[in-house]
């Protein structure tokens, strides 16, 4: 009788099938071989079945801290605060932290005005 085992290796679950065939006389050999050949045919079918393409990966929008965002935009924290208040870059509050999505940072990059220096 076949029985399945679940294995956990490298942070993934795998299933393993085991079958024990008990042959006690020479008359049982043809039936045992027939069973093994039938199981091998099933395995061949599984192996030859084309794999379905994986679902498209979802775009992960990384959250950046105020410090990371200011460094990415090459501005000060005070300027980032002003840009946020003016709506030039969207901020997201999570608990007491203010975070910025990477996508919003990219959108605001071309909008950054150069400050004239004397």
Image (cartoon, grey):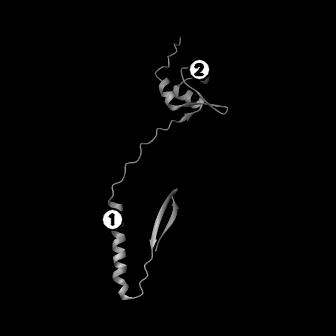
- Of residues 20 and 9, which is closer to you in this image? 20
Most distant residue in the right direction: 96
Q: Quadrant location of residue 22?
A: bottom left
Looking at the rendered image, the disc whose residue lies closer to the viewer, 2 or 1, is 1
Q: Quadrant location of residue 29?
A: bottom left
* Image location (x, y in percent) of residue 101: 53, 31
Residue at the disc numbered 1? 44
70 vs 3: above or below: above
Residue at the disc numbered 2? 79
Q: Quadrant location of residue 35?
A: bottom left
- Label 2 crowd (10 A; few <14 / some 14-19 / many >=20): few
* Image location (x, y in percent) of residue 5: 50, 67
- Of residues 74 and 69, which is closer to you in this image? 69
Total marks placed = 2
- Label 1 crowd (10 A; few <14 / some 14-19 / many >=20): few
112 vs 61: above or below: above
* Image location (x, y in percent) of residue 117: 53, 13
């Amino acid at each position: 009788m076949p029985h399945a085992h679940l294995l956990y290796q490298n942070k993934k679950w795998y299933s393993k099938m085991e079958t024990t065939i008990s042959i006690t006389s020479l008359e049982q050999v043809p039936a045992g071989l027939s069973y093994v050949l039938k199981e091998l045919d099933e395995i061949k079918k599984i192996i030859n079945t084309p794999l379905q393409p994986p679902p498209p990966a979802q775009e992960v929008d990384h959250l950046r801290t105020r410090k990371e965002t200011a460094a990415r935009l090459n501005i000060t924290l005070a300027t980032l605060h002003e840009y946020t208040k003016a709506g030039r870059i969207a901020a997201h509050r999570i608990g007491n932290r203010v975070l910025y999505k990477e996508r919003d940072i990219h959108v605001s990059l071309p909008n950054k005005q150069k400050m004239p220096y004397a």
